[in-house]
Image: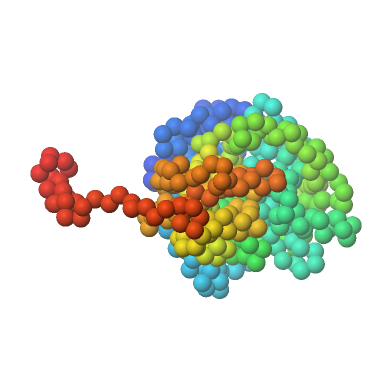
Amino acid sequence: MAIRDLRDFLAVLDAAGELHRVDAEVDSELEIACITDRHSKLPGGGKALLFQHVKGSSYPVATNLFGSPSRMALALQVEHLSLLTGKMEQLLAAPASAPPPTLVRQAACQEVIERLPDLGRYPFLKSWPGDGGRFITLPLVFTRDPETGLGNCGMYRVRIFDDGCVGIRWKPGSGGFKHHEKYLAADLPMPVAIAVGAAPTLTLAAMLPLPESVDEVAFAGYLHGAPIAMASALESELLVPADAELVIEGVIEPGATRSEGAFGNHTGSYEAGEEVPLLRVTCFTRRKDPICQATVVGPPPMEDCYMAKAAERLLLPLLRRQCPEIVDLVMPLEGIFHGCAIISIAKQTPGQGRRVLECLRSGGWLKRGKLLVVVDSTGEELTLAQGGWQALNAVRFPADLVVTPDGCLGVDATGKLPEEGGERKQFLQPDTSVSAQVKRRWREYGFL
C-alpha cells in the first residue's frame, strides 16, 4: 500500500509483522528510551515499537520504526536499500522528476488548534539520566529565507523548556542555521514551524545533507512517488506537512537564547549542550489523536544507524559527481552517518587515492568524516569486510596516512603503482575450468 503518512507506515509495518504494541503503562521519562535501547540491540534490530499507554499523557509514542534494513526499505518502498542509488541517479539526471508539493486547505495536522499550548501533556522523551530535559528527537523544522523566500526542512534537535518555549539547535552551515543568521543580521523575528510524525520519506529527507539547490519536500515527493501534501501554517507564511501528527509554530526573537543542557549522544557520552535559539510558541496544532514519533540516540546499533545506511545509498551518486572515479562506499554502523567511510575507486594514475581524499575533504557531506579510507574497486559490491581486508593488506604506515589540521584521518589504501614505489601484483584467481567443474558437481559433493 502507498505510505502517505505515519499511520500508513505503521499499518505497513504491522502487516509485515514488524510492529510490536506495548500495552503496559510506560513512562516517557527514561523508561521508553531504556526499552527502545535494549530492544533495538536485539538481532535484526528488533521491531518497531508502539507504546499505547504513556504515563501522564493521552497519546501514544512510536519508536524504532526505521531500526532495521528491512523496515528502512519498507519506509522508502523499495525491495532493498541498494536500489536507492539508482533512484538518486535518475533524479540527478532528470531533476524535474522531483514533484513539488501540493497545497491543501484542510489538513489533518490542524484538526485541533491550541492557542495556549500545554506541551507538558505530550510524551516527548527524556532518554538518558543526565539529559538536560525532554527533547523532540525526530523533528521536521521548517524555516524560510527572509531574502529569497525559499523554504528549508531540516532535522535539528528540539529541547522542551516549558509549555511556551522550546530551543532549537541548528547544525552550523545548515539551511536553518543560515536562515537564522539572516534574521539576526536584519534584527527581525524568525517564524519557525516544527512538525512531528510525517511521511517516512520526508523524515529521511529532513536529515539528509542535500545540496542547497535540492528542495527537501520535493525530494521526499520523488522518493514517495507522489507530491507531499502541505498546508499553510496558521501563524506565518510557512508551509507544513498536512498529514503530520502535530505541529508547533512559533517565533525566535532576535538574540533570544537559552542553554539546552546536556544531551546523550551516539558517541556514548553526553554533549554539554550550548546556548540555542529560543522559540516562543504561538500556536500548537495536531490531529485529534496524535502519535508522537521519536528516536533514541545512543551507542549503536540503534535506529539512526539504519537511517544512515539509507543515506549512504542515496548520497553515493553525489560523491560520484564530486569525484568521478568513485565506484562505491560503505559506512560502518558504528560510524553513524559520516564518522567513517571506506570508498572504492577505479584507480588508473599515480597519486589518485590521495587526490580523492583531498577532493572529499574540500567539500561535500564527507568533508568532516573522522576516518576516510580509499581502496581499489574489485568490480564487486563493496562490503565492510572486503574493504577492511583490502585496506589492511595494502596500506603502508605512515606513508599512506593523511591527517587534517582538525584531527581527521585519511588513508590511501589503494594498491601502489610502480611509479608510487609499488609493484605489479598477480591477484589470486581460481582455475576457470576447475571452478566450472566444482559448480557442476556441487550437489554431488553432498552440498545443497
Considering depth in this image, is 130 or 22 the residue closer to the camera? Answer: 130
Q: Position of residue 19 (x, y in %)?
A: 44, 40
Q: Position of residue 33 (x, y in %)?
A: 58, 31
Q: Residue at x 44, y 36 (%)?
A: 46
Question: Is residue 441 shown left or right of residue 389?
Answer: left
Q: Residue at x 55, y 65 (%)?
A: 321
Can residue 376 be seen here?
yes
Q: Residue at x 16, y 51 (%)?
A: 434
Question: Is residue 429 shown left or right of residue 99?
Answer: left
Q: Is residue 213 above or below residue 143?
A: below
Q: Residue at x 81, y 41 (%)?
A: 275
Looking at this view, name the residue that lies furthest to the right: 187
Q: How is the image coloured?
A: rainbow
Give the total of numbered labels.
0
Looking at this view, name the residue that lies furthest to the left: 444
Considering depth in this image, is 134 or 421 the residue closer to the camera? Answer: 421
Can residue 329 be seen here?
no
Q: Position of residue 345 (x, y in %)?
A: 47, 58
Locate the C terminus and report the quarter of the image it occupies: top left
Question: Is residue 205 shown left or right of residue 148?
Answer: left
Q: Is residue 411 above or below residue 326?
A: above
Q: Position of residue 407 (x, y in %)?
A: 67, 42
Locate the N terminus and report the quarter of the image it occupies: bottom left
Question: Is residue 259 shown left or right of residue 66?
Answer: right
